Amino acid sequence: MKIISQTPRLLIREIETYDAGAVFELNQNPNVIRYTSDPAFKTIEDARHLIETVIKQQYKSYRHRRWAVLLKDTGTFIGWCGLKFMPELNQVDLGYRCMETYWGKGFATEAAMASLHYGFAQFNFNQIIGRVMKQTMQSIKVLKKCGMTFSHEAELHEHPAYIYKISKEDFLSQTKI
C-alpha cells in the first residue's frame, strides 16, 4: 500500500483491488453519481474490473491516478480523489467523490487540495483543471475553495459543464508546498 498524502484528517493512498467493495458501494448511491454520468455498477466485479483495468492502467501510463481517501483515525474508506490525464484535452483533471455520509464536512476540499499539492510538487504540472457539470454547486464550491478559477464552458458526457483551472504559480502563491 503506497501512501500518497496525509492531511490532518485524511490518509490518501493508492486504490487497490481489495477496495472494490467500497468503490462499488460509493457508485451505487444515485446521489453520488447523479452528476457524473457514470452508471451504477451491477456487481462488485464491475468495480474490481474498473480498478484493475482503468485506474491501474492510468498509473502505469502516467504515474498518477485516482486514489483512495480514508479517515486517518479509523481507516474508513470515504471516497476517492486524484489526478487523471485526459489525452483528448492534453490536460490533467482533478477529480473527487465522497460517500454521501461525508458530504458537507470539508473532506472533498481537503482531499482535492492534497491532490493539487501532489501534482504540482511531484509532477511539476504547470496547470490542473477541474471539470464539473453546471448543476453541481457543491463541487463548484470545492474547486473555488481550492483556488481554481472559471475558465470556460464545455460539454461533459453530453451535459453542459464548466471547466475550472489553476496554474502551479497561482497555487504556490496561495499555499506553501
Image (cartoon, rainbow, N blue to C red):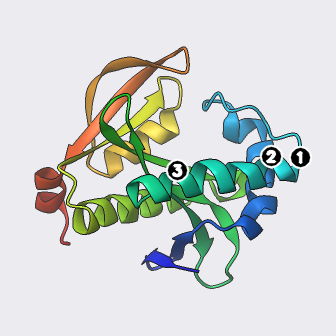
Residue topped by disc 1: 43
On screen, residue 27 versus residue 61, left or right, reads: right
Left or right: where does residue 93 sit relative to residue 36? left
Asked whether 26 or 143 is in front, the reply is: 26
Residue 82 in view of the camera: no
Residue density around tag 3, few if under 14, some if 14–19, many if 20 or more, within 10 Å: many
Q: Amino acid at mark 3?
A: Tyr
Cβ–Cβ under 8 Å for marks 3 and 2: no
Query: On the rendered image, what quadrant is the C terminus found in?
Result: bottom left
Marks 2 and 1: in contact by CB < 8 Å?
yes
Residue in the image at 74% along x and 50% along y:
49
Which mark lies nearer to you, 3 or 2?
2
Judge by depth and name the residue closer to the eye, 153 or 56. 56
Answer with left or right where residue 30 lies relative to residue 165.
right
Residue 46 bears which disc, if any? 2
- Residue at the image point whose x is 61% and y is 65% from the top: 15
Residue beneath disc 3:
96
Mark 3 in CB contact with mark 1 (< 8 angstroms): no
